[in-house]
Every structure is written in structure tokens, then in C-alpha cells.
């Protein structure tokens, strides 16, 4: 589902519909984060989600932030939850771990909106309550709805099968032909003159070793699909890369355009790369 909703939207955004949730809702627990204004549109959305998550897998988030309308908003959320038969869950709208980090939060907010702290106005939060609170304080804040605290514990227990350690890089197995390791295949495709592998002196460190071989093969496959050499900047988090050498100062980006460079240019690139590697005392 995440792949689907990210493909529809610009980078760093998602476009999720109720139809998506209906199709992929199995084994999901959902918590509705209420908007600032609890209007009829929100009520209709919550009713739609209740129909999708119809077996006690839906909750309505409630936070106590000591705002000027905190009491009225909390009472309105309670009425919504009771009307929709959706259990409340105690949340905290956390933006930082301790109150002392509010100043940093304000600075980051100003960077986001392109303004100074003096100009930020209502872009900034009114107090320093968006921090992690102790269980005792959360119980006091929700003394009128202790079931909201119990619901948060219940959700945590029901989701206990997931561990953050499960989130890791997983490269596809099909990047290598059968019977070849990633390094063997990388050495083979390197000889096809699509690009030249340049190994910088400090490249072979543990952080690069784990992912770089498979990643480079993926870059190579992508480059072949668009008939382009792999260019400088394709995953430069590690201290090595696939690059074209520059005659005067090391590495540079290949010429722009949709057509691959001519054979003469490829040969010239290879020769310049060999010369560059000799200076590094690294064999090609």
C-alpha cells in the first residue's frame, strides 16, 4: 500500500484514499488524528473509516495540550467518539522529547515557513507541552476518560508482533544472474564499457561493504534501461561512486542528453580513467 500511495504523489508525500484502506485494511490498526476544526466533513470521514475498520481496529486520538480551547475541544472529541462508537485513545502529539527543546522546534518551524521567530506568529505552538509525558501525568490528564489510557496500552500490545529492527535495506535478489555473487557480476558488467568503476582509497569500509555492490548493479541496470551511463551523484552517501573522470580535476558528470555518448567518447573516458587510477595507484 505504501508503494501505491507514494507513486501517486510528489516526492516525500503520499496520496491515500478510502478505497486503498478498504483493499489493504486486513491486519491494520488505525488511529484517526482529528483536524483542528471538527466539522461535518471530519464526521463523514470518521464514519467511512468506521465502516472499513469494523471489528474494533479503529480509534480516535485525543491529546491534552493546555491550549486556550483545550477543555472545549476535549469535550467535543468525547461527544464525537460516543456518537460514532469509536474508542478514544490517549495520545500526546509529541514534537520533542523534553520541554527544553521547544526553542529548537520554533527554529525548525521558522525554517519550514521561511520566516523569523518574530514573524512566525501562529505558526508557532503556544506552549512547550508537545513533549513526552510520564505515565502518571498522562493518567492525570485523562482522569475523566481512563479507558483512553487503557486503549493506548491495548493497541501497543496488539501491535507487539512488530519490531523496528525489521526495518532494513532489502535489495532484490534478481540483480545477479544465477551462480554469481554481486561482486562477480559487477566485475563482469564493468568490462562492457557502460561505465568505469573508480575505487577511492577509503572506500572499503564496513558501512559501504554491506550495500554498495548490490546498489551499483541496480544503478547499472537502470542506466541500461534508459541508454545512459551511470552518472555522478547516484547514491553518493558512501565514499565511492560510478563517475566520469575530468581531465583536470578528478570526477565529473557525463554530458547531458538522451543519447548515449559516441564510441570515441567512451574510449576517451576509459583512457582518462585509467590514467586517473594510476595516480591513485589502484588497478582498474
Image (spheres, rainbow, N blue to C red):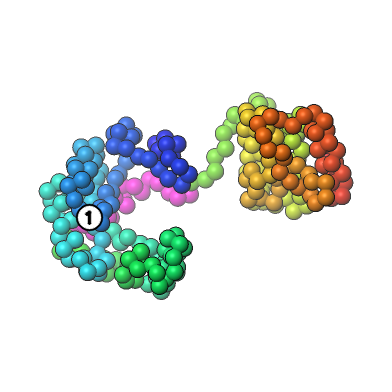
> Label 1, on which residue?
37
268, above or below 110, in the image: above
- In the rendered image, residue 283, in percent from the top left (x then y), is placed at 84, 42
Residue 239: in sight, yes or no? yes
Image quarter of the N terminus: top left
| Corner quadrant of residue 19 | top left
Q: Secondary structure at mark 1?
A: loop
**271 vs 99, nearest the viewer:** 271
Q: Residue at horizontal 80%, vertical 28%?
A: 263
* Highlighted magenta segment, given as a residue range: 146-165
Q: Residue at horizontal 15%, vertical 51%?
A: 80
Is 163 a magenta residue?
Answer: yes
160, above or below 214, in the image: below
132 relative position to 242: left or right: left
Residue with the most extreme top position: 178
- In the rendered image, residue 267, in percent from the top left (x then y), is placed at 83, 33
Q: Residue at horizontal 84%, vertical 41%?
A: 272
Secondary structure that dominates the magenta span: helix
Mark 1 closeness class: few <14, some 14–19, many ≥20 residues within 10 Å: few
Image quarter of the C terminus: top right
Residue 26: in sight, yes or no? no
9 relative position to 281: left or right: left
- In the rendered image, residue 169, in percent from the top left (x then y), is placed at 54, 43
Amino acid at each position: 500500500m505504501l508503494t501505491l500511495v507514494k507513486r501517486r504523489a510528489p516526492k516525500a508525500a503520499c496520496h491515500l484514499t478510502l478505497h486503498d484502506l478498504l483493499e489493504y485494511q486486513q491486519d491494520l490498526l488505525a488511529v484517526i488524528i482529528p483536524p483542528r476544526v471538527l466539522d461535518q466533513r471530519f464526521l463523514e470521514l470518521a464514519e467511512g473509516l468506521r465502516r472499513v475498520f469494523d471489528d474494533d481496529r479503529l480509534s480516535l486520538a485525543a491529546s491534552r495540550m493546555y491550549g486556550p480551547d483545550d477543555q472545549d475541544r476535549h469535550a467535543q472529541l468525547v461527544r464525537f467518539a460516543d456518537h460514532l462508537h469509536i474508542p478514544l485513545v490517549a495520545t500526546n502529539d509529541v514534537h520533542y522529547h523534553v520541554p527544553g527543546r521547544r526553542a529548537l522546534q520554533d527554529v525548525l518551524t521558522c525554517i519550514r515557513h521561511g520566516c523569523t521567530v518574530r514573524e512566525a506568529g501562529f505558526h508557532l505552538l503556544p506552549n512547550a507541552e508537545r513533549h513526552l509525558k510520564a505515565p502518571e501525568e498522562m493518567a492525570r490528564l485523562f482522569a475523566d476518560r481512563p479507558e483512553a489510557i487503557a486503549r493506548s496500552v491495548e493497541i501497543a500490545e496488539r501491535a507487539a508482533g512488530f519490531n523496528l529492527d525489521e526495518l532494513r535495506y532489502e535489495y532484490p535478489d534478481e540483480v545477479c544472474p544465477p551462480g554469481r555473487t554481486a561482486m562477480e557480476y559487477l566485475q563482469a558488467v564493468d568490462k562492457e564499457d557502460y561505465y568505469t568503476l573508480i575505487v577511492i582509497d577509503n572506500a572499503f569500509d564496513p558501512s559501504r561493504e554491506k550495500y554498495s555492490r548490490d546498489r551499483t548493479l541496480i544503478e547499472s541496470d537502470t542506466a541500461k534501461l534508459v541508454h545512459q551511463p551511470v552518472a555522478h551523484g547516484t547514491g553518493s552517501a558512501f565514499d565511492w561512486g560510478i563517475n566520469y573522470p575530468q581531465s583536470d580535476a578528478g570526477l565529473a558528470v557525463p554530458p547531458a542528453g538522451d543519447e548515449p555518448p559516441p564510441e570515441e567518447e567512451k574510449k576517451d573516458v576509459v583512457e582518462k580513467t585509467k590514467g586517473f587510477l594510476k595516480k591513485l595507484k589502484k588497478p582498474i
